[in-house]
Amino acid sequence: MLQADVPVYTPATLAEARQLLQEPGTRPVAGGTDAMVRFKDGVWRPTAWVNLLRLRGELAYIREDGDWLEVGALTTFSELLASRVVRERAPLLAKAVRTVGGPAIRNMGTIGGNIGTASPAGDSLPALYALDAEVLVNGVTTIGIAELMLGPGRLKLQAGDLITGVRFRAQAPDEVCTFEKLGLRAAHAISLASVAVRLAPGMARVALGAVAPTVIRVPDAEAALVAGHAAAAAAAAQEAARPISDVRASAEYRRAMAGNLLLRGLMRMLGPNLVSPIGGDPR
Amino acid sequence: MTNQQTWIGKSVHRVDAPAKLKGEPVYMTDRPLENPCFGRVLRSRYPHARILRIDTAKASALPGVICVLTHKDVPGLNGFGIVIPDQPVLCFDKVRMMGDALALVAAETPEIAAAALDLIEVDYEPLPIVDDALAAIMPGSPLVHETGNIHLRTVIRRGEVAQAFAEAAVVVDHVYFTPRQAHMFLETEGGVGQLMPNGELHIWCPAQAAFRDRLQVARLLGWDPERIREYSSPSGGAFGGKDELTVQHYLALLALHTGGRPVKIHLSREESTVAGIKRHPFMVQMRTAAAADGTFLAQEAFVVADTGAYASLGGPVLNLAIEHIGGVYRFPSLNVEGYCVYTNNGISGAFRGFGVPQVLVALESNIDEIARRLGRDPLDLRRQNLIQRGDLSAIGNPMTTGVGNQAVLEALENSPTWKERTAKKAAVTDPWKRRGVGIGLCMQGLGLGKGIPDYGAAVIELLPGGKFKVGISIQEIGTGNQTAYAQFAAEALGCDVADVEVIQGDTGYSADAGTVTATRSVFTGGKAIQITAEKMVALLRSTGAESYAAAYAVARERGLETKVRGSFAWPEADEEIPGAFGLPHHIYGYGAQAALVEVDTLTGEVQVLEVASVVDTGKSINPMGVEGQSEGGVAQGVGLALMEDTVVREGRFLNANMSNYIIPTAGDVPKVETFIVEVHEEKGPSGAKGMGEVPIVPTMPAIFGAIYDAVGVQMFRAPATPERVYMAMMGDPSATEDTPALRARIAEGRRAGLAAQLHQTEGEGYAQPKGPEDEEA
Ligand SMILES: Cc1cc2nc3c(=O)[nH]c(=O)nc-3n(C[C@H](O)[C@H](O)[C@H](O)COP(=O)(O)OP(=O)(O)OC[C@H]3O[C@@H](n4cnc5c(N)ncnc54)[C@H](O)[C@@H]3O)c2cc1C
């Protein structure tokens, strides 16, 4: 089938969209920033596109619900960044989202699409892992983000399922957090490795991006941080990484970076004196 | 120059800016067409294979397909290439790279054309490949061309090299590798071809050599060139990548089979990367000797350039690199041996800098090490060895034209980046980062070089109302030469820039002024316009009129020709360099840069914070334009030094589009401060030289020097990606490529190259020079 022959349906309601997606071989498209690239390359050739644009009224939102925040799947990265609620109550997510692509990509790209693509290099995902986020499916059920992600491009969803949102507990005012991303340039860079870190007295969360088939949490690193051992945490991160070699970087380098980005994040959050850099002074 | 000038030297706004800023379809691949059809090219599935069978029946039968063409449909010479026509228009016996073309399709839509490509059946017999330039020299290597893998070997020897090394206080010897940089112009290769009702073939295609393109197309069609008209300007970037034919040959063939309908080809980014020209990857082993007082004594180098499957401009690129092997410094003795070799790694050719950045990084890095070992200031050591006017360059060329070295170095020394380096380095923010400053100096030969015909020509037409049309074949490829030409014309004719319309790149109107390459466009066009303008002034006088508006009326009345033509020949050196085709050049542009970088010691990331870019332009025709070229050159140089490489493994391309082929974004490009130095060139138009290539040349060594200054590691392979910098900082032994095994291979390559040289039949097109003392190599 030629590209031009692939129909695009634009349903007006969630129910209608789910109906259309029952048809085998169909695929939803939100901002299209992943979909168009893969469509062009022939990687994705659905029998029809189900364009979610008209569901924005239903699915583009940022809601506070007591201790919880809920973000609609069609919320764009730019909307997340513009939101004071997100900046103040989920600063980790804001830091991560700021590194996505460039302004044009952030204007189109959605958080639902970032989850939907299920790339280990998806930059909002380490933050969502570190926030213990739950993903809303079809507006009714929830599933933990880590449970949802099966592998690169693979989600634990049924045909016709739509991601409708994501929810997580707001970060506490006394915690610190950072998102460290390493790419091959300052913007429009696919992560070679990334680390999302949250720290508060007695609590640590460490999630690594782009160094395993999915984003991974590193419980050993978290335990080391709670105990105040930065170097041990970095070593645990390197240990946990299962990176690949590709045209962008070697597995060996990615593994080293899993630890070093964690150290860099700790130095940024806590000040350099708390952490002795393993990078050292090469001279 | 003391005489007052109205336009020359003024920062005139670019005449092409408004349309470009408004996003109008100024480029030929953007313009709407009436009743178009769409062409596609079938590329090879193997980097090296024999072609057993090509069957186009199914493709031809697909509804919507207009024609399918193969080598059988090439009526004339089935080959092209600027220097030697060794690249088939459509392959017939074998393919030598992934970008090789086997068939052409024209169809009603681009998608049908693409579908038709899938229906063309080709049987291949894969052949062993050679994907390493040094390996290509060795005996037993698979042969890309039956005549042998060595396209060109150039040897230059001067002075008492062995003695100099024996007497030297410091000898630095390293091996450097530079990448297969892609031009990544905004507008990929493309165009439109149409057979016109009058029987002419018209080709609209952004290019760099309209008249030569026309000749190449005429040859493959077996046509009279006069029946072909190429419109080749403007171009959405070129940088050398459109110097060779890009799609003109395909457009020409298809247009003969589309019933007079315009046929359009526009390469995708991926196809452009795979099939298009690249910067030659170089391996440079360089050994440099200096005396205890810092005087440079000898320079020795072994250079291998990977030209890929076809020659294109590989020979001249190698030779220009060799010409600049000693940079801007005096070297009383020299021993350089260079190879340009065929591999199955795509194809390389012209790219801004034309081989010079590839060797300059080795030279300037070696010099930095000499300075360290002698405990000398790197800038001061360079100053001590600068070529002065009247000196011989390293290859023995008497430098008799405007030598800008000294002035350039002084401007560099006074730039804040260099002068305030201590404070700037201390201003590092994060404790895991280190800052450093490095410098690079360069010169760049202008024009085509000794023995290569190099002419300029222009036409000027007087229009009603006293306005003018200036016709020159040299294209606007984004550099701003259209504006400079309008300035030259307005100055010489005494009119306003707005009264001059510049027609570029149209073989049906413009005079043949050669290529927009070799930093020759301002010199060539400026000179040609000035000479032609004198004839226009003479026309004015002959009419006795007071103004051009009145002159036009008089001329019409008397039936006088209102279009005048002028031409000139480029000045060239008196003596050629024996054994080195096209060498030496006669006029050089000069440049220098200082770079301030910040290295993240935890990741190896290098951020270039600022670059001071000094350029000796001779007279700057348009200082704002010079700044633009300077900033663009630095940006492209940052990419070359830190990010860009077309990765080809076993002949296949691994990063053909821009998600993995990394070029700098605005966030990666430093603050660039440009310092213009005007060392008058008496042979140039209004004292101008040219500068378009110069600013990319010193960027890589300046950045490498800065990385060393920051973290104490020398990078030997570009691009210096975060991983490479990190591994080098960690002292990872695998980061060192200069092993005894490599040295042994180099020695073997030198022996094999010499032996091959003695046996290999001469190349088809031009002299294969032989060094006088080859026996001792
Ligand atoms: C130039 C460029 C730069 C980029 N830079 C980055 C970067 O720095 N970091 C990064 O993480 N990503 C980056 N991306 C990738 C992309 O922008 C993000 O993954 C983005 O979040 C995708 O969102 P989208 O709305 O465009 O998704 P789409 O392309 O519309 O869809 C992506 C996938 O998710 C599915 N999907 C979309 N919405 C839903 C839903 N509600 N329910 C179920 N499935 C759904 C689609 O079917 C599809 O499989 C970049 C992309 C480009 C083109």
Image: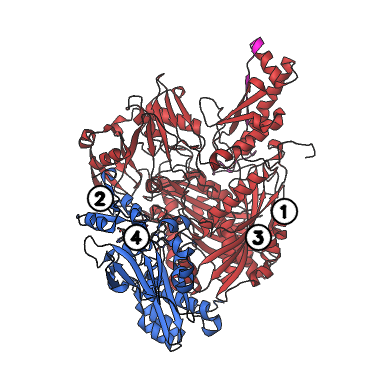
Q: Are discs 1 and 2 located on one and the same chain? A: no
Q: Nearer the viewer, residue B175 or A257?
A: A257
Q: Does residue A243 appear to the left or right of A178 in the view shown? A: left
Question: Magenta part mainly helix, strand or loop?
Answer: loop
Nearer to us: label 1 or label 2: 2
Instruction: Specify the subunit that label 4 lies on.
Output: A
Residue A120 position in % (x across, y down): 35, 67
Q: Crowdedness of circle 2 by 10 Å Cα count: few (<14), some, many (20+)?
A: some
Q: Are marks 4 and 3 on the same chain?
A: no
Residue A71: x percent and y percent? 38, 67
Stretch of the chain drawn in magenta:
B556-585
Which image quadrant: the N terminus of chain A? top left
Label annotation for residue B296 = 3
Residue at x 41%, y 69% (from the top left corner): A193
Residue at the limit of the structure toward the top, as seen here: B558
The amino acid type, in three-letter code, at marker 2 is Ala
Horizontal side of residue B245 vs B14, given as left or right: left
Distance in Å between CA atoms under marks 4 and 2: 22 Å
Q: What is the spatial separation of the Cα atoms under label 1 and label 3, in whole angstroms?
A: 17 Å
- Nearer the camera: disc 3 or disc 2: 2
Say which colour chain B has.
Answer: red
> Which dot, 1 or 4, sits closer to the camera?
4
